Amino acid sequence: MTPLSVLDLSPVTTATPGSAALRNSLDLARLADRLGYKRYWLAEHHNLASIASSAPEIMIGQIAAATTRMRVGSGGVMLVNHAPLMVAERFKVLEALFPGRIDLGLGRAPGTDPVTSYALRRRQDAREGDDFLERFQELLLLERGGFPQNHPFRAVHAVPADVALPPVWLLGSSGHSAELAAAVGMGFAFAHHFAEHDATEAMLSYRAHFKPSETLPQPYAILAVAAIAADTDAKAERIAASSDLHFARRAKGEFLPLESPEVAAAYPYADIDRERIARHRQRLIVGGIVSVKSRLTALVETTRADELMITTMAYDHAARLHSYELLAEAFAIAPGS
């Protein structure tokens, strides 16, 4: 059976402020650990009213301390926002404290709007354009001691120096990210939950072009999917109404906390809103557990995903917990499996 994992954005709602959303993440992580989920990843987003997950490194430490079995990691650290040395040291500290349980997922985008991105980077050596590859290479050279003798970073070591970086994963929503992950021989996680790019094409391309590395001899691809499962289709549709309204508003530049299903049901949607929601529903899997499992299984078969990573944005925390419980039962996962 396909392993299941969690991608958590710590959703903020009109009834759940950011501080409570972070505590809810700890609650969900404990449940996922008991149920047998393979790993638990925290996102990095900034200046979004609906997402409290802005510092994944801090939450990784808190969640790893509150659980015993799952791998815990970043989904991901947006490398363009951070100095590579700082990323290396933070994740070496995490690996030292929780050996064999930490993942370092790296993303190319800033996870925010251009102005906020500038505010995050203004004290660094700001560059024009996408400098992800340069930062990624610097991170690897710091870890492997690969700088030439005359390079000023030759004597720089990320500490604790006796601890290796945890496994590095490349995150992406395009074919380019899949090609890069394949070329460097690293694990790949595709963001089906928001990507416009075809997931099957990216996942199969990664597998076809994968070059074995010292850290990963065979390709390993995770498919991140947005899903809401409930006891019945009707209950799932009610829960998903909050996500529908949230997406319609975001498309108009309105970045607000998740509203309740009741507010969403009463919202005066325009025709363009309903068209956008319909397109979004092609990525968001909603329904009773039987139909949700069927759609997820079909995605695994077409993409050849090694693992499913589920993200669930719901207004009610109990409904979110129950969705993950239903998925765990349907896919017959269990601790130690």
Image (tube, rainbow, N blue to C red):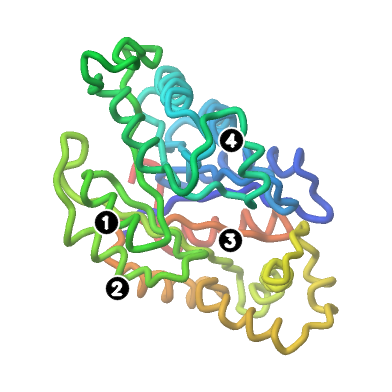
Which residue: 61% across, 79% down? 233
Taking depth in this image into account, of 320 and 152 the one nearest to the observer is 152
Query: Circle 4 sits in a helix, a strand or a loop, which is it?
Result: helix
In the displayed structure, does residue 282 sit left or right of residue 319? Answer: left
Taking depth in this image into account, of 179 and 118 the one nearest to the observer is 118
Q: Which residue lies under the disc numbered 1?
A: 179
Q: Which residue lies under the disc numbered 4?
A: 121
Q: Which residue lies under the disc numbered 2?
A: 302
Query: Circle 2 sits in a helix, a strand or a loop, which is it?
Result: helix
Taking depth in this image into account, of 144 and 264 the one nearest to the observer is 144
Distance between the Cα atoms at labels 4 and 2? 39 Å
Q: Which residue lies under the disc numbered 3?
A: 323
Q: Quadrant of residue 244?
A: bottom right
Q: Earlier in the sequence, mark 1 or mark 4?
A: 4
Distance between the Cα atoms at labels 1 and 4? 27 Å
Image location (x, y in percent) of residue 286? 57, 73
- Using the image, tell me which numbered label, if any, was put on residue 204: none
Which residue: 76% across, 38% down? 19
Within-10-Å neighbours for mark 2: few <14, some 14–19, many 20+: few
Q: Amino acid at mark 3?
A: Ser
Looking at the rendering, in which quadrant would you find the N terminus? Answer: bottom left
Which residue: 32% across, 22% down? 142
Q: Quadrant of residue 59?
A: top right
Q: Earlier in the sequence, mark 2 or mark 1?
A: 1
The answer to whether residue 54 is above or below residue 294 is above
Q: Earlier in the sequence, mark 4 or mark 3?
A: 4
